[in-house]
Image (cartoon, grey):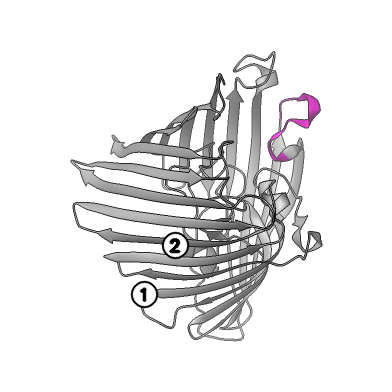
Amino acid sequence: MKFTKLSLITALAMSSAFAGGEVTEIATVEVAVVPATTVAGNITGYYFTNDSKANADMFSQEASQLGLATTLDVAHKLTDNITLNFSAVGYLNSLEQENLMYMEGDKRGAFFNVANVTFTYEDTTFVAGRQLLATPMLGGFDWLLAPGAFEAYTVVNNSVENVTLVGSYVTKWRPNNTGENFLNLTDIDDGNNFALGAVYDDKLINGSLWYYNVDAGLAATGIDKYTQVYLDAGYNFGMAKVEAQYVATDYDTATDATAYGLKVSGEVSGFNLYAAYNAIQDNNTGFVGADSLYTSSWNTFASSTYREDVDAFKVGVSTTISGVDAELSYADYDEGNEADLILGYALTDTVNAGLIYSSTTKNKKNADADNAVELFATYTF
């Protein structure tokens, strides 16, 4: 399940990126002997139910979750160049469940999702420790409780106007909705997992080129270790924006995979519209945590749809009506499909509520649709 995905530059700049999904600029202190400390966070109440569990009806206790979670974000500026960032997450599921079918895998728990030191010199930022990453084919997506996170060493450079260069060496990974469990990726095969990227965006033309080496491919994809090249480009014509993407995955022993994509988006009378297509050929496209294929949905990553060759289509519309942000989308994955309705409303400057309804049919013959409803309310401080 996915919530609003983290933007690439926001997640990697790491001036202050935290699990609540908000990024707050760290204030500059004039007197160096007085360190700057910022504290923020949120409290979220959530309810989730679906009809995918055998012998359990939707909205029954056996098929539902009701809980409370809180996130505390602290950034402490040691000097003008060095900042310590922490994000602590605590949660409590109130409904008794069999087989530990709780959100984050346990009835209650707490962990540090972010804990890193950031060093900045001129146009270069270095981040060491637990952090949020959101590259096109390796990253975590925003979750009602906390985004997936990584332990990594990341370098970001912005010396060239409109260009961002990124390098990240990843040692551990906490997949979404897995509690405090960080998988040690260095123990898998050769243990080298890294991403190198260059991103260009001048508002009219945008594009990016990425190279991935994932030795922990079996843990990430269930297939094999791999290397991968990702390329995308877009042009804003004013009335519409056209984007294209290409992904080539070179598996060590498994059949290699290729993916292509095209997306057209624009605004008409206050409605944001888009239509997208992806062709996934020969095998599932490799990714770690989350992908950025145009036809991926709330519950479905187009990269991994249980079939060797997939022609995927997706259409969507979003708008704001009487203060309610609404998005409706439908995606088709050959045998499978997914329809999503996402609603959000800001009750005050600090309190917002949302509803997500999804109906997902896996990409298998004669599969039944799984319906799910999620409700949440968040207070941000």
Q: Secondary structure at mark 1?
A: loop
Q: Measuring 80% from the left and 28% from the top, which residue is drawn there?
A: 99
Q: Is residue 325 visible?
A: no
**Residue 178 drawn in magenta:** no
Secondary element at tag 2: strand
Which residue bears the numbered disc 2?
231
Q: Position of residue 197 (x, y in %)?
A: 51, 70
- For mark 1, what is the residue? 162
Residues shaded magenta:
94-104
Residue closest to the eye, 357 or 139: 139
* Marks 1/2: CA–CA distance: 17 Å
Of residues 5 and 256, which is closer to you in this image?
Answer: 256
Check residue 99 for magenta coloring: yes
1 or 2: mark nearer the eye = 2
Please tell me which residue is depicted at 71% across the width and 44% down the height of the picture: 178
25 over 98 or under it: above or below: below
x 36%, y 55%: residue: 244
Whether residue 353 sits left or right of residue 265 in the image: it is right
Mark 1 or mark 2: name the one nearer the start of the chain. 1
